[in-house]
Image: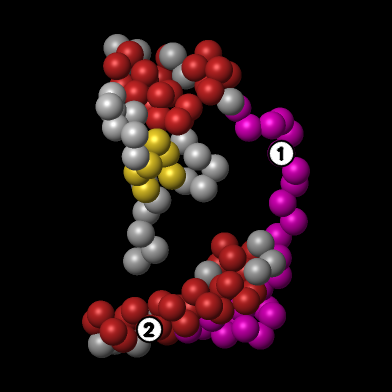
Amino acid sequence: MLSLARTGDRAAAIRQYRACVAVLERELGVPPLDETTALYEAIRDGRIAPVEVPPRATAPMGVAELAKVSASPFIGRDAELGRLLADLAASQPDGRRSSSRKGDRHVVDHRPPLF
């Protein structure tokens, strides 16, 4: 909620609080912590100011650039690095990726669940 409020999206932060309340009630039968409610009230009342985020100094790295600079953290892990780079190259902008297994032609959804 705080991250959403800090980026200026108060409406999304409030929706997140309401979703949190609903899940806590449905799954555990408990109310949110007082600290969570206090944060919600601060967001609702406009007491959490958005933070100005400076623009990126450089464009995000592509696969080729990543392959050049990522060799040292994976010393002795060439197979793992190869799989990571293959998955990165196959990834879709919406978080889905084509399966990297040979013969698989379907798209696999690797986005984490919301709850």
Which mark identifies residue 22? 2
Assign a secondary structure to mark 2. helix
- Quarter of the rendering occupied by the C terminus: bottom left
Magenta-drawn stretch contains 103: no
Residue at (43%, 23%) from the top-left corner? Answer: 85
Predominant SS along the magenta part:
loop
Residue 100, percent from left and from top: 34, 29
For disc 1, the neighbor class at 10 Å (few under 14, some 14 to 19, many from 20) is few
Residue wearing tag 1:
56
Q: Is residue 15 left or right of residue 85?
A: right
Residue at (62%, 83%) from the top-left corner? Answer: 44
* Residue 24 at least partly seen: yes
Q: Is residue 83 left or right of residue 61?
A: left
Between discs 2 and 1, the one toward the N terminus: 2
Depth check, front residue: 111 or 47: 111
Could you tell me the amino acid type at mark 2?
Ala
Residue 91, percent from left and from top: 47, 36
Residue 30, percent from left and from top: 29, 86
Could you tell me the amino acid type at mark 1?
Arg
Which mark identifies residue 19? none
